[in-house]
Image (spheres, grey):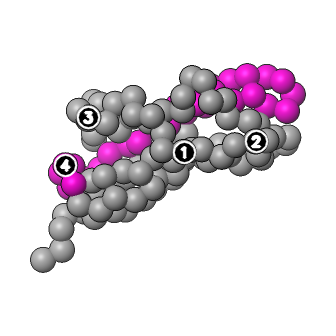
Amino acid sequence: MPDGFVTIRQGEKRPIYGQETLSSGTMTIASSPTPAATLYNSMGAGVGGFVGLPATGYDSGAQATPRVWLVLDTSSLAPGFYTLVFNFTATASDSTTRIYEPSVEVQVLGVQA
C-alpha cells in the first residue's frame, strides 16, 4: 500500500514527496548513496526514463519526518496510475542505519479540453 497519493495532469511538472515518520527520535538521510526514485506503471514495470533517477532533493540534518522529492515531468506519461518509489539510506538517532522506500501512488490525468 502506498504511503501517499497525488493527482497530477499530463504535461505538468511538480515535486512529488516521499516521507518517512519515526515513532520516536530522528533520522538523517545520507547523501551517499544518492537518494533515488523509480516510477512504476500499473503493471509494476519500471517506466523507461524514470528508473533510478537521482532525487531532486531531500531534507538534510536530523528530522523526525524527513522527506525526499522528485520533480516529476509528466509530459511523456500516458494518463493512468503509477507508483513512485523513493529509495534512500538514513541513520536514526539510535545509530541504526536502514534503507527506506516510501512510495506514492500517482494518478496522471489527461489534458483538459
Q: Is residue 84 magenta?
A: yes
Q: Amino acid at mark 1?
A: Gly
Mark 2 highlights which residue? Answer: 61
Pick whichever, 55 or 65, lies toward us: 55
Other residues around mark 4 within 10 Å, as few (<14) / some (14–19) / many (≥20) = few
The quarter holding residue 45 reads: top left
Q: Position of residue 49 (x, y in %)?
A: 26, 34
Q: CA distance from mark 2 to mark 3?
A: 30 Å
Q: Quadrant of the C terminus?
A: bottom left
Q: Is residue 80 left or right of residue 39?
A: left
Other residues around mark 3 within 10 Å, as few (<14) / some (14–19) / many (≥20) = few
Q: Which mark is residue 86?
A: none
Range of residues picked out in magenta: 75-101
Mark 4 or 2: in front is 2
Picture residue at 31% right of the left edge, 36% below the top: 50
Q: CA distance from mark 3 to mark 4?
A: 10 Å
Pick whichever, 22 or 11, lies toward us: 11
In the image, is residue 13 above or below residue 43?
A: below
In the image, is residue 10 above or below residue 82?
A: below
Q: Under tag 1, what secondary structure?
A: strand
Mark 4 highlights which residue? Answer: 76
Mark 3 highlights which residue? Answer: 49
Mark 1 highlights which residue? Answer: 57
Other residues around mark 2 within 10 Å, as few (<14) / some (14–19) / many (≥20) = few
Q: CA distance from mark 1 to mark 4?
A: 22 Å
Q: Are marks 1 and 3 in contact (CB under 8 Å)?
A: no
Q: Amino acid at mark 3?
A: Gly
